[in-house]
Amino acid sequence: MSSGDRTLFAGLDIGGTTTQVVLCADDLTVLDRAEVATPAADGGRAMVGAALGALAPLLRRTPGRLAGAGVGAAGVVDSAAGRILVASDSFTGWAGFAVTDAVEEALGVPAFLDNDVNAFLYGEVFGGAVRGASDVLGMTLGTGVGGALWTGGALFAGPHGAAGEIGHIPGFGDLPCSCGGRGHLETLASGRSIGARYAERTGRRLTAREVAHAARHGDQDALAVYQAAGVGIARAIVMTAGVVDITTAVVGGGVARSWPLLEPFIRAALAAEPPVSGHPIRLVRAALAGDAVPVGAVARARRELTAGVGV
Ligand SMILES: [Zn+2]
C-alpha cells in the first residue's frame, strides 16, 4: 500500500485557551500535529474554524485519505447530537453550537464529539497506558478534576453525560469547590487547589508544580498537601470500585506530572483501604500526556466508523 492510500483520522481538542489538532494513521500513531490559540470569545464557528485552519496544512502535507474526525471539547456535550450543551464562562457562543455539523461540512467526512475527559479515556484505552482494559476509571488532574468511566469495554456516560464525574461528589472535607459545591475531590486534587491549600498553610502562593518542587526538597507543608491529594484520589478510586467494580484507574492531567511524588500517597491509601472486592486496583499514570484528548477523539471516531455505526 502506498502512503497515498493510507487512511487518516483528524483529532481536534478544543480547549479554553489552546486548540490542538493531530493527524493520525489508522493505528493511532500521530503523523503530524499543530496548536493554535482558541478564539473562545468569538463564538463556535470561529473556534471550529481556527481548529480546521490549523488542520489544513497537516492535510496538505500528509498523503492519505481522511476517513473521519473526532473532536474533544471541555464542558457538557451531547455526544449523540454532536453539540455542546453547557460551556464555562470563558466561552462565548459555544453552548448549543453544532460542532460535528460544522466539521463534517468543512471536511466532508463523518465527525464525532466527546467531552474532553471522555476523549482522554478513549485515548488511554485504545492507545495509552490501559490498552485493552475493560473496566477503568479515568481521572484528569488539571485546573479542575475530571473523571470518566469505561465499563464492560465501553464508555459509560450515563443519561446526563455525567457518569464518572468523580471530581464533584462530596465527602472530601468541607472546602468550597469551583462548581459551587463543598467538600469535592477537586478541592484537594486539582492544580489550582494544590496551590490554594499550600497558601492556606504557609501564606505563600505557588503553582502546583512549585509545591511539588518544594515537597521534593522536604517542605512538610508541601508534602502534606500532596498527601491529602493522594488520599482523596485513592478514596475516589475505592468509591468507584465499590459502585461499578473497576479493575484499573488511570490518572492524567498536569498534576500527574508529579507522579513520583503523588503515586506513593495514592498507593498507601489504597493499601490501607482496599476495595471490598478483595481485588487490588491497578493504578497507572496516563501515557499519552498532551496528546490524550485529540488521539482519544480519533479513537472514538475510528471505533464508530469501524463498527459501522453512523452518526
Ligand atoms: Zn465541585
Image (cartoon, helix red, strand yellow):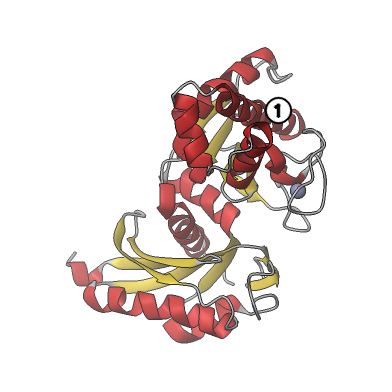
Asked whether the viewer can see residue 26, the reply is yes
Residue position marked by numbered label 1 in the rendering: 235
Task: Give neighbour class at mark 1: few <14, some 14-19, many 20+ (Cα, 10 Å).
Answer: many
Rendered image quadrant of residue 190: top right
Q: Is residue 190 above or below residue 228?
A: below
Image position of 87 with respect to 263: above or below: below
Q: At x 49% / y 73%, what residue is drawn?
A: 38
Q: Position of residue 70 (x, y in %)?
A: 49, 66
Pick out the residue farthest to the left.
2
**Residue 216, position as x, y percentages in the image:** 45, 25
The image shows residue 201, relative to residue 297, as above or below, that is: above
**Amino acid residing under circle 1:** Arg
Q: Nearer the viewer, residue 204 or 121?
A: 204
Label 1, ligand 1: CB separation under 8 Å: no
Please state if 231 lies on the left or on the right of 256 as rendered.
right
Question: How many marks are shown on the rendered structure?
Answer: 1
Residue 5 is situated, as x and y percent measured from the top left of the image, at 24, 70
In front of the other: 49 or 100: 49
Q: Secondary structure at mark 1?
A: helix
Confirm whether residue 12 shows in the render.
no
The foreground one among 134 and 149 is: 149
Residue at 46%, 68% (x, y): give it: 19
- x, y percent for residue 152: 63, 40
Indicate whether 220 appears above or below 180.
above
Q: Quadrant of the C terminus?
A: bottom right
